[in-house]
Amino acid sequence: MRSRYPSSLDLGGSFGPGPLTPAIKMIVIANVVMFFAMLAVPLVDSLGLTPADVVGRLQIWQPLTYMFLHGGPFHILFNMLALWMFGTELERMWGSKFFTKYYFVTGLGAAATQLLLSLLPGTFGFLMYNTTTIGASGAVYGVLLAYALYFPNRTILFMFIFPLPAKVFVMLIGAIALYSAMGIGGGVAHTAHLGGLIAGYLYLKGGRVNLASEIQYRFLKWRINRMRRKFDVYSGGRADDVDRRVH
């Protein structure tokens, strides 16, 4: 599958999907601003997602605000890098309005997963009830799910080493999140990752994609491909290079 908007690392020298699209740019800016604000002011207790605070103290803003907080530079770096690399082409295809809605639906879905699991009886529910979750990972996992649904055969480097089709990559990270969620600890909210994946799948399979924007995007890609073939112009290499684009 060729891409007029390369969304992967091309071994020939080009990198990434291009400039930040409008919605992703605003999301990245908001996350960076909040990250530096956290260095000056302790925000996690009030803005991080803690089910005990949401349920017991009615701090109902936390399911939204938690996704703008990150635990360290690598946490925010990898989340924003993944958002840019996998979300840019989706925003171009869907439009900024739908992409923004989808991003927050998956982030809120991840938060809802944490809240629902915290109400389970027993030790697991008790630990979840008093555990604080921060980060955009749930929403980013939702973006990864959408990318795999639309571009299932695109190549992604798992652990930056092993090339896998996008559909296999997402199934693998979903399986890892499920296995890891069987226990709690390690400082990673694996259940939130699962929640983002599930929320994204249900939302897209519910038929809420902006079909008009997608059809327009696909038609534009077809016209560009036709003109480039006519004039023997190729983006990122010849047609036999398409499988070499990897994340």
Image: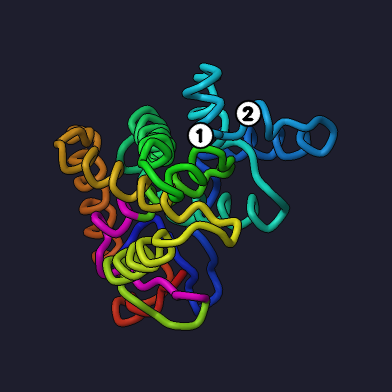
Q: Residue at x 50, y 32 (%)?
A: 51
Q: Residue 22 shows which numbered tag?
A: 1
Q: Is residue 117 magenta?
A: no
Mark 2 vs mark 1: in front: 2
Q: Residue 47 shows which numbered tag?
A: 2
Q: Is residue 154 magenta?
A: yes
The picture quadrant where one finds residue 166 is: bottom left
Above or below, 127 against 150 in this view is above
Q: Residue at x 37, y 46 (%)?
A: 196
Do residues under tags 2 and 1 come within 8 Å of each other at their CB atoms? Answer: no
> Mark 1 belongs to which amino acid?
Pro
Q: Nearer the viewer, residue 120 or 154?
A: 120
The mark that comes first in sequence, 2 or 1, is 1
> Mark 2 belongs to which amino acid?
Leu
- The colour scheme used here is rainbow
Q: Residue reaching furthest front? A: 122
Q: Residue at x 68, y 58 (%)?
A: 74
Above or below, 96 against 18 in this view is above
User: What distance separates the C-alpha of mark 2 from that of mark 1?
Assistant: 25 Å
User: Relative to residue 47, is residue 123 drawn left or right?
Assistant: left
The range drawn in magenta is: 145-159
Query: Residue 156: where, in percent of width, then height?
Result: 40, 71
Q: Residues within 10 Å of mark 2 (few under 14, many from 20)?
A: many
Above or below, 181 against 133 in this view is below
Question: Does the rendering let one see residue 233?
Answer: no
Local SS, label 1: helix
- Marker count (numbered): 2
Query: Residue 11: where, in percent of width, then height?
Result: 50, 79
Local SS, label 2: helix
